[in-house]
Image (cartoon, rainbow, N blue to C red):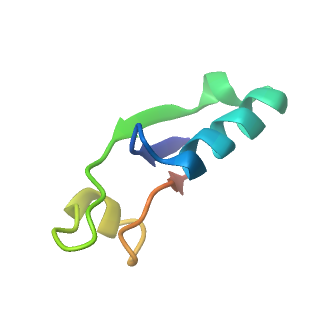
Amino acid sequence: MKLHFAPTSPYVRKCMVIADELGLSDRITLLAASAHPVNRDANIIANNPLGKVPTLVT
């Protein structure tokens, strides 16, 4: 699984806590993304039309 993340996002932190609790954190590859409200990251939009993080690709 791949997770698009931004280091300052509280939502990504919540996802990572749950993944750790379920024992899935070693199966997730973190992909740094620059989520911005105006200048959208094309890598995120390819998987999430809203262009927001966290975006999980299974």
Q: Position of residue 52 (x, y in %)?
A: 41, 65
Q: Is residue 33 above or below residue 52?
A: above
- Direction top: furthest residue: 26
- x, y percent for residue 56: 54, 53
Residue positioned 50% across, 54% down in the render:
54
* Residue at image point 44% right, 34% down: 30
> Which corner quadrant holds the N terminus?
top right
Residue extending furthest left? 39
Whether residue 57 is visible, yes or no, is: yes
Instruction: Give the image location of residue 58, x and y in percent.
Output: 57, 51
Residue 53's place in the image compared with 14, above or below, is below
Residue 58 visible: no
For residue 14, what is the image quadrant?
top right
Residue 2 vs 37, above or below: the answer is above
Where 50 falls versus 12 (above or below)? below
| Along the viewing direction, whichever of 53 and 25 lies nearer the viewer | 53
Q: Residue at x 56, y 47 (%)?
A: 10
